[in-house]
Image (spheres, coloured by chain):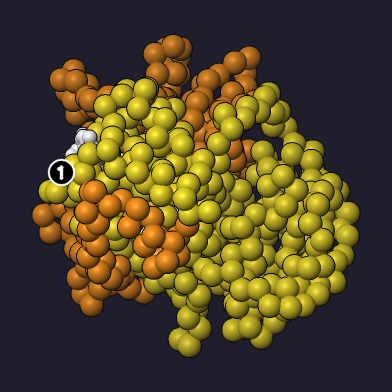
Amino acid sequence: MSVLIITEQSDKKIKKQSLESISYGVAVSKLLNVDAIAIVLGPSDDVLSSLGEYGVKKVIHQQTIGSIFSDSRSASILLNSICDQEKAQMIIFSNSLFGKSVAPRLSVKLKAGLVTGAVKLPEISNGFSVRRSVFSGKAFADVKITTPTKIITLNANAFEINKTRGNAEVIESNIEITPSNITVIETKKNEGNISLADADKVISGGRGLKGPENWGMIEELAKLLGAATACSRPVADSNWRPHHEHVGQTGVAISPNLYIAVGISGAIQHLAGVNRSKTIVVINNDPEAPFFKAADYGIVGDAFQVMPKIIEAVKNLG
Amino acid sequence: MKILVCISRTPDTTAKISFIEQNTKFNPEGVQWIINPYDEWYALVRAIELKEKDASTIIHLINIGTNENEAIIRKALALGGDEAIRVDSGIDDAYHISEQIANVAKDGYDMILTGKETIDHNGSAIGGMVAEMLDCNYISLATKLDIENGNAIVSREIEGGEERLSAPFPIVISCQKGMAEARIPNMRGIMAARTKPLKVLAASANETHTSINNFDLPPAKAGVKLIPADTPELLVKLLREEAKAI
Ligand SMILES: Cc1cc2nc3c(=O)[nH]c(=O)nc-3n(C[C@H](O)[C@H](O)[C@H](O)COP(=O)(O)OP(=O)(O)OC[C@H]3O[C@@H](n4cnc5c(N)ncnc54)[C@H](O)[C@@H]3O)c2cc1C
C-alpha cells in the first residue's frame, strides 16, 4: 500500500505546486501509516533523491513520456500501470491543468473516488473526508470518499511545503507509452511573463486604469516582485489586455500568496476567482469600492499617484 | 456531426451562498437559477456557431437532474439545440453523473462538450470521466474549437502559453473563455424551445464514489488595514514584515 504523488515540472525542475503536493501526500501517508512515493515525469535537472527532504521514501522516475501532457488518455494509462505496480491506495495530483485532465480518467480506471480542489488534510476519524473549495471560493464542502482507493487534487497554496532532511531511493521506470492519436499542431509561448495559474504573486488591473497604455506600472511592479499580471473581465473584453489574463468567475481562478488589485471595483464575479488568495491588497480611489471588504490591506487613492511610490518603495527594499 | 452538450443548473453568480439543515444542504431560498455559465457561454454557444456553419450538425443537450431543472433546459433550447435529454436523478456525485452522460453519449455522438467546471461544485471532473467511460480522447480547458478535415482542432492554454491540438472523433472537450461570445435568446428561439423535444430518461445505474457531509463558510476577513495614500511605502513594509508576502 502506498500514497503516490504525481509531480509536474517546469523547465525540468519540480514545480513549487508539486512540492506542496508532495508535502501534502507525505502528511496523508503518515495518517494512513504507509509510504509516500513521488512520481517524476520526463527528463529532470533536479537531483531526485533530494525529494527525500520532503519525506518521500521513493521516487519513481519515468523518463520517456511521449505527449502525455497533451493527451490525457496515454497519461492515465501510464499512471494506471504505476498505481497497479505500487499498489497505490491514494493518489495525489496538483489541481492543475494536468491534474484536471488526468485525475478524472484515472478515477474511472481505478474506481477510485475523486475529490478535486482539496484545501486541507483528510479527516479519517469517521470514514474518510476531505475539505474542498466550492461555490467559486465562497464556501467549503467536506466530501466523503466511499471507495477503497482514493484520488485527491490539491489546490495551489493550500498546503505549506514541509522540508526537513532525508534521501529518497530513485527508481528509473521504463513503461512504454501508449501511442497518442492527438497531434500537437503548435505550441506558443506567451510573451515573457509568469504564468498566472502557477504564480505566487499577482498584480491585477481593472477599468480604473483607463486604458491599455497605463499598464506600464502594473508590469513594472510585477517584474520587480516576480509576479504575474492579471486583469478584470471588462479589461480583457475591451482588448486592453489578453484574454488569458482575465481572472474571476468566468476567467481563471487563482489562489496566489499575494494579490494586488489596482482600479478594480471588486464585483462578486471578480472576487469569486481571487478570494482564495492569501493576502489581498486593494488600491482604489473610491472608499466605497466593495473590494475593500475582501481585502487585507488597502489604499484609498489615485492609482496613478500611488503606484509609482509603491514601485519606488519596492526598489528600495533591496 | 452530432454534438452532445452537457448543461448544468447552478445558482446565479450573485446568489447569496448559505446552507440549511445543519449545513448539509445549499439554501435555495430566493436563489435565481441559471445555466452554468461555462456550459452556456462557451460549450453551447460554440456548438450553435458550428451548426450555423454546417446546417447538418445536430445538437442535443443533456442534463442530469430532477424536474426542477427543466426551466434552464428550456432556456438552453431557446438559445439553440435540436432536442434535450434529462436523466432523472437527484444524486450529486461526479461518477454517477458521468455514467449517465456516457450512457447517452455512446449512441453515436461525435463530440461531447462540457463547461470547464460548474460554478457551484467547481469539480472539473465530468468531462474526463465521461471520456474514460467512452474510451475516447479528452481535451480539457479548451479556448478554441474548430472542425477541419474530420478532426477537432482545439486550442488550450498551457503553462505560460498555448497549444493547438488536432484529434479525431469521438472526443470530449471541456470549454472555457475564448470559445465563443455569450448570446441572449431571442423571441423566435424562446417560442421554438417550447415545442422542441425534451426526453426524460430514468437513471441507468446508481454507483457513487463520494458524498457531501456538510458545507462551511470561510471565516470572515479580519477587516482591511487602510494605509494613507501619501505613505504607500508603509504598505510595502507591511507586506514584507507583517504579511511576509514579498
Ligand atoms: C455572469 C457574470 C460573470 C462575470 N465574470 C467576471 C469575471 O470572471 N471577472 C471579472 O473581473 N468580472 C466579471 N464580471 C463582471 C463584473 O460584474 C464587473 O463588471 C467587473 O469585474 C468590473 O471590472 P472593473 O472592476 O475593472 O471595472 P469597474 O467596476 O468599472 O471598476 C473600476 C474601479 O476602478 C476604480 N478607479 C477608477 N479610477 C481610479 C483611479 N484613478 N485610481 C484607482 N482606482 C480607480 C473605481 O473606483 C472602480 O472601483 C462578470 C459579470 C457577470 C454578470
Q: Pick out the residue farthest to the bottom.
A: A125
Q: Quadrant of residue B22?
A: bottom left
Q: Which chain is orange?
A: B
Residue at disc 1, secondary structure: loop
Compared across the picture, whether A2 is left or right of B93 comes to right
Q: Is residue B107 above or below residue A26?
A: above
Q: Quadrant of residue B8?
A: top left
The picture places residue A201, in percent across and down from the top left corner, at 47, 51
Which x, y percent locates residue B189?
Answer: 22, 21
Left or right, A294 with reference to B146: left
- In the foreground, A6 or B47: A6
Could you say which is closer to the camera, residue B28 or residue A166?
A166
Q: Quadrant of ligand 1?
A: top left
Q: Is residue A180 left or right of residue B91?
A: right
Residue A112 in sight from this viewpoint: no
Comparing A302 with B78, the one in front is A302
**Mark 1 within 8 Å of ligand 1, using the beta carbon:** yes
Q: Is residue B1 visible?
A: yes
Q: Position of residue A226 (x, y in %)?
A: 53, 46
At label 1, counting other C-alpha atoms closer than 10 Å, the crowd grade (few under 14, some 14-19, many 20 or more) is some
In the rendered image, which residue does mark 1 sit on?
Answer: A286
Q: Position of residue A98 (x, y in %)?
A: 61, 48
Q: Residue at x 74, y 39 (%)?
A: A67
Report the chain holding disc 1.
Answer: A
Amino acid on which the number 1 mark rests in the picture: Asp
Q: Residue at x 53, y 54 (%)?
A: A318
Q: Nearer the viewer, residue B97 or B237?
A: B237
Shade of chain A as shown in the rendered figure: yellow
